[in-house]
Image (tube, rainbow, N blue to C red):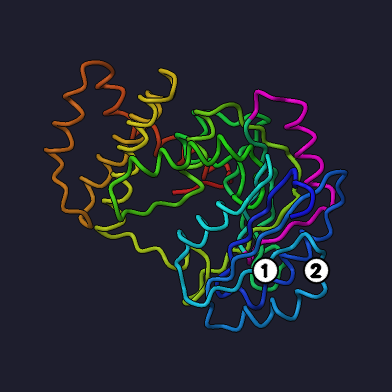
């Protein structure tokens, strides 16, 4: 097995044939004073991604492990298998179409976490690029402050894009598993949002204000990004409401009163939003009845959607990137 790595980098790959080389070479270029491992899971892509990886494998350092699945596992199972294989105290997860742009970012993030034991994760900023790996004019809704907060979570800002994160492996996987376990079976919701909340419950989250990564956003039909596949329909609405309820249960089990309040405001925002939306069969009267059953802060929870839309509307007017 060789020496134990300090950092495990897991790379989920599916239909990333045009991009995965740039992703892996950016990781291989990292200059560190510690050992790290890279575990690549190629999930039986039909576009020739496996052939690209087989060509690259002899050129990559010995700390890279390439796994080409014989049959498709799906994004969730592929990721779970990669997490189980990880051995490092720290963990990073990169999608095969994103890439790192600074060869010292891993060292800088490890140095920060080593020096600050009260932090569980550190993110960086990113550029948003298109198919050609050049900035496409979009801006990611990332946190502009040094520390991420529950307030920023409520207003749909992320600490950073997923590929910019380095975290402590054990608290990250523990919080992730517990929160997922509280969601209704079979529902799915974007992992970056779940992770942002669970990490805040586990400890502090740092946001380094340096652009050291690139997030590839391809929204054309057939693109591999989440944005190109998501459909805002009844199933999505039910999944979002399930996620909101899971946040509340998780915060009540593990979080502070501030985390519980943030979770409830988020949950009731989802509930009231979809109850007023014709794409969901949830009745507004039922949603209002649920909110009014709260013994405390019911007015605060009723106003949560209005506050959310007001703040994000003002941000949009100022040209600040937002995530709806």
Name which quarter of the figure residue 56 lies in. Answer: bottom right
Q: Which residues are magenta?
A: 96-119
Mark identifier at residue 60: 2
Mark identifier at residue 152: none
| Image-based side of 20 in relation to 243, left or right | right
Task: Rate crowding at label 2 as few (under 14), some (14 to 19) or many (20 or more) other CA atoms within 10 Å.
Answer: some
Q: Secondary structure at mark 1?
A: strand
Q: Which residue was labeled with disc 1?
A: 66
Task: Rate crowding at label 1 as few (under 14), some (14 to 19) or many (20 or more) other CA atoms within 10 Å.
Answer: some
Q: Secondary structure at mark 2?
A: loop
| Image-based side of 78 in relation to 159, left or right | left
Name which quarter of the figure residue 130 lies in. Answer: bottom right
Q: Earlier in the sequence, mark 1 or mark 2?
A: 2
Residue 287 rendering spot, x and y as whole percentages: 18, 37
| Image-based side of 200 in relation to 233, left or right | right
Above-or-below relation of 81 to 269: below
Q: Residue at x 48, y 35 (%)?
A: 198
Q: Residue at x 74, y 81 (%)?
A: 55
Quarter containing the N terminus:
bottom right
Contact check, label 1 and label 2, Cβ < 8 Å: yes
Residue 274 rendering spot, x and y as whole percentages: 25, 47
Q: Residue at x 33, y 38 (%)?
A: 246
Residue at the outermost front position: 1
Judging depth in this view, the residue of 261 and 247 nearest the camera is 247
Name which quarter of the figure residue 313 lies in. Answer: top left
For residue 17: magenta? no
């Amino acid at each position: 097995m060789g020496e134990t790595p300090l950092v495990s980098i897991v790379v989920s790959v599916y239909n990333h044939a045009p991009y995965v080389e740039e992703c892996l070479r950016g990781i291989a270029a990292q200059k560190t004073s510690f050992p790290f491992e890279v575990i690549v899971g190629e999930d039986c892509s039909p576009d020739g991604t496996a052939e690209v990886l087989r060509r690259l494998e002899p050129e990559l350092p010995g700390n890279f492990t390439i796994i080409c699945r014989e049959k498709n596992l799906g994004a969730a199972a592929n990721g779970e298998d990669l997490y189980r294989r990880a051995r490092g105290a720290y963990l990073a997860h990169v999608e095969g179409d994103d890439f790192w742009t600074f060869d010292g970012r891993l060292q800088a993030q490890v140095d920060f976490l080593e020096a600050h034991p009260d932090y569980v994760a550190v993110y960086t900023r990113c550029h948003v690029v298109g198919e050609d790996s050049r900035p496409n004019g979009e801006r990611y809704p990332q946190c502009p402050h040094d520390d991420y907060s529950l307030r920023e979570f409520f207003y749909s800002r992320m600490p950073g894009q997923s590929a910019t994160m380095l975290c402590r492996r054990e608290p990250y996987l523990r919080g992730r598993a517990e929160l997922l376990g509280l969601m209704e079976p079979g529902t799915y919701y974007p992992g970056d949002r779940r992770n942002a909340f669970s990490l805040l419950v586990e400890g502090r989250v740092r946001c380094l204000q340096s652009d050291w990564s690139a997030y590839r956003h391809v929204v054309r039909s057939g693109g591999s990004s989440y944005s190109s596949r998501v459909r805002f329909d009844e199933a999505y609405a039910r999944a979002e409401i399930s996620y909101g309820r899971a946040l509340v249960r998780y915060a009540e089990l593990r979080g502070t009163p501030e985390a519980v309040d943030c979770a409830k405001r988020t949950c009731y925002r989802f509930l009231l939003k979809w109850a007023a939306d014709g794409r969901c069969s949830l009745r507004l009267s039922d949603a209002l009845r649920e909110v009014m059953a709260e013994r405390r802060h019911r007015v605060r929870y009723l106003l949560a959607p209005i506050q959310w839309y007001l703040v994000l509307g003002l941000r949009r007017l100022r040209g600040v990137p937002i995530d709806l």
